[in-house]
Image (spheres, grey):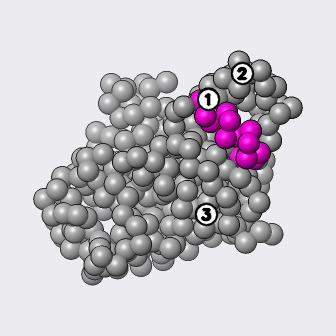
Amino acid sequence: MSDYTEKREWHPVEEREKGLVEKLRGITKHAYEKAPAMKKRFDEAGFHPSQIKRIEDIEKIPIITRDEYIKMQRENPPFGGFLTVPYETLKRIYVHPGPQYETLADADIKHAQKVLWKVGAKRGDIVINAVAYHFVPAGLLVDDILTSMGITVVPTGFGNTDLQVQIMYDLKATLFAGFPLFFMSVIKRAEELGYNFKRDFHIKRALALGSSPVRRSLEEDYGIDTREIYAYLPVGIPACECEEKSGMHIEEDFIVEIVDPATGKQLPCGEVGELVVTTTFNDILPRIRFGSGDLSSLTDEPCPCGRTSYRIPKILGRVGEAVKVRDYS
């Protein structure tokens, strides 16, 4: 068993949720005591961490939307009162357009390492990181995680397909990280330049950010194993596909809910609503019930891989793109 695999991934759901309740109570208590913005929100909602008795009690905590989060950061820069340590002690501050400020704890990196290992990244790889770097934190985030695993990263970012082709060929890159549609455009450009991609290039795996209809072609026509990951800052990477590719498994120590965007109430498995994410391990910047704005659902159907976590079948769109969530298809 790898350092990045945990036995509890195969434990019964009830057993895993029992441990999550303790961690949820601990992180809400820490946030209440150390993050002024969290204490204020909890008090206004009439919530106290001692009220956490079961996993469903998380619904007593108000959801934080991205707009609210940015507004609070603007009113109280740079972190809006959510940070529990002085920001000059942080290793790195990531900046979203907005601006929106984020940071990662060592625990965030550790959890993300597990995800990227599961989807195919390993020591010895040479990774083309075609995720944007400039004033978008995703590229640098993926870079930080991969390099922390001892993996060689080539920070190409997005665009310039001719140069991407040359770099992939010269460095004998083994893995691509980025959007599948862009990867396909690079492959097509390589073919236009006279290369045979399957013969001349070494990339056989791809970390796919987001769903795409070209994934089937990447796999069937070019023999590239693609795995989808769900990445959402400020919470990190809460879900990824296993080898069965039948939905993205919720990672350990994350709590993912599907809620009705209009009421904030939890929805049962199979119903479509907004993804709301909680991390139970980041004590620097606690992320408790952060609304992603993404529309999806959860399934508790057994996965052939044997893992017992809930899964996200796919991301369907953004809140606001569907007039009636329950009618979304």
Question: Any mark on residue 162, and which?
Answer: 1
Give the magenta part as a residue range.
Answer: 161-175
Residue furthest out toward the left = 75
Residue at left offset 27%, top offset 68%: 82
Quarter placement of the N terminus: bottom right
Q: Which of marks 3 and 2 is in front?
A: 2
Residue 319 locus on image (x, y percent)? 35, 35
- Callout 3 environment at 10 Å: few (<14), some (14 to 19), or many (20+)? some
Please indicate whether residue 85 sits to the left or right of residue 119 in the image.
Answer: left
Q: How far apart are marks 3 and 1 (CA)?
A: 25 Å
In this rendering, position of residue 202 left or right of residue 78: right
Residue bearing the label numbered 3: 147
Label 3, label 2: how far apart the Cα atoms are: 31 Å
- Going from N to C along the chain, the mark reached first, 3 or 1, is 3
Q: What element carries label 2?
A: loop
The label on residue 193 is 2
Q: Is residue 324 visible?
A: no
Residue 46 among magenta residues: no
Residue found at x 37% / y 26%: 322
Q: Which residue is drawn at 74% across and 42% down?
A: 170
17 in relation to 139, above or below: below
From mark 1 to mark 2, how far is it between C-alphas?
A: 9 Å
Residue at x-position 37% and y-position 41%: 293
Label disc, if present, on residue 300 of the rendered structure = none
In the structure shown, which secondary structural element does the residue marked by tag 1 occupy? helix
Q: Is residue 231 at all visible to an observer of this figure? A: yes
Determine whether label 1 and label 2 are within 8 Å by CB: yes
Disc 3 residue type (three-letter): Thr
The disc, 1 or 2, on the residue closer to the chain's N-terminal end is 1
Dots 3 and 2: beta carbons under 8 Å?
no
